[in-house]
Amino acid sequence: MEKLAEAWEQLLEDISSSFHVSTINSVLKRIKVENGDSGKVILLFPNHFSSNLINDEQKDLIRAGFAHSLLIDPDYIVFSVSEEGLEPVHGSNPSPTPPPAPAPARAAESQEMPRVHGRVPGKARLRPDFTFDTFVAGDGNLEALAAARKVAGNPGSAYNPLFIYGSVGLGKTHLLQAVGSMACLHFPNLKVKYCTIEDFTSRFIGAIQSGTMPAFREEFRSLDLLLIDDVQFLSKKTETQEELFHTFNALFLTGGQIVFTSDRSPYEFDTKDIQVRLISRFGSGLVCDILPPEFETRRAILESKAARHRLTVPAEILELIATKIQNNVRNLESSLLRFKNFHETYGRNPALGEMEELIKDLLGFSARPKVGVDQIKSIISTHFGLSPDDLEGSSRKKNIVYPRMLAMYFARKNTKLSLSEIGQAFGGRDHSTVIHANNKILELIESDPHVLRDVSTIEKILG
């Protein structure tokens, strides 16, 4: 078994460039490797949803690679699904207080309707325009979108919790509320609540002051689906963290579904500000990130929003906006509203120069990173006694490969560039190389104190 485990870990490293980092961490690392009958090796997914996230072509890649490592025929590598249910996702991270075993899912067992709670979906505080139909899919959000749809169609039976993170204005709230809208549509009697963490905190404090904590706890702990936005604002709210921790456990025990959003991964939270056991809860299901949209996706978002606002926008205006507004979907819509206001005010469309002037204040927020990739390359090459050209070159020497991966990691973390743009900045490399570098550094931070020291030192230099 030890040989199998070592071979599996090596395979994951070898194929990491072929999979998104979320798939590696949330699906492949959860597969159990076991010896089967007649010399077969069983790759055991924790559940059917995990298995469905890996397509047949990807399974063939895994099968061929693992068979090659073990020197056996690929037909002896068999995929199967465990009957044990869900397990924590990021197994290498500390989890001092694992969540209790969940009860059977409430919402959709054997295609039955959930139990009646008497709450109408309208009271879930969901925006009618934030649905899956109005959410524009792109390379940067496909995994989060697929997971959100799965959760909405079968609350409590897919990934629980689902944790979606990404920068400001990329559609996290839209996706979160779309989960609620679809769940209410499929299960009209479902008890659903959407709130921001600030709403939860305010309600919690109000309940303490008014002596209505039993009613507050009954309201939140009897839900079938709880959607909480912006959990990063839990920082240093000790009593609210305690209450959310027990709310999580109460819902989890009775099969309730929880979905969180944040501007960062749960493992980027500072344990001085948020309890380790709560961070562990956030990461105990599926963690998905949303990346800034590529140009084609930005253009598609603009076309979708223009149609919804019944606007006829010239192609060159759409091209301008999609080119200039790179990292914030919310600002794309704001740009269209400025176009609309100009048209209604002057009775004509703005010229390109006028349109650029209309959106210039959005560019500083959306498109200018605090730290540039050239600055990152300069700092890291100096730190390791190299030149920026070394980081862009093709050398596979260890003393260059490691700093190059570090530079890609910091470019991913500190700039607003897409994965493809970062790859281009490092000698025209593919976006999958950037994903592999980022994933590798995250792993080394957990296991190698020298890497952790390098990362901390460079972070201080970057400010």
Image (tube, grey):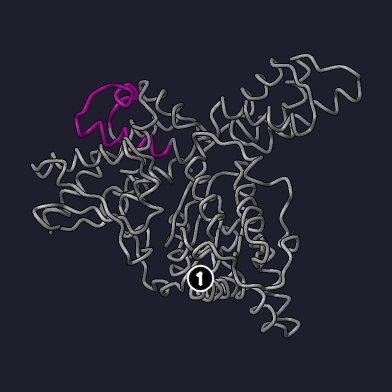
| Foreground pick, 148 / 202 | 148
Q: Can you give x and y, in whole percent of width and height, for residue 435 in the image?
A: 37, 37
- Residue name at image x 51 percent, y 64 percent: 156
Q: Is mark 1 on a helix, strand or loop?
A: loop
Quarter of the figure with the N terminus: bottom left
Per the rendered image, the range of residues in magenta is 385-410
Q: Can you give x and y, in whole percent of width and height, for residue 338 in the image?
A: 80, 29
Residue type at mark 1: give it.
Answer: Gly
Give the labeled residue for mark 1. 255
Dividing the picture into quadrants, the one containing residue 256 is bottom right
Give above or below for 293 relative to 107.
above
| Most frequent secondary structure within the magenta stretch | helix
Q: Can you give x and y, in whole percent of width and height, for residue 21 in the image?
A: 38, 43
Q: Can you give x and y, in whole percent of width and height, for residue 263 in the image?
A: 55, 50
- Residue name at image x 45 percent, y 53 percent: 287
Does residue 393 belong to the magenta stretch?
yes
- Residue name at image x 32 percent, y 51 percent: 445
- Residue name at image x 20 percent, y 49 percent: 8
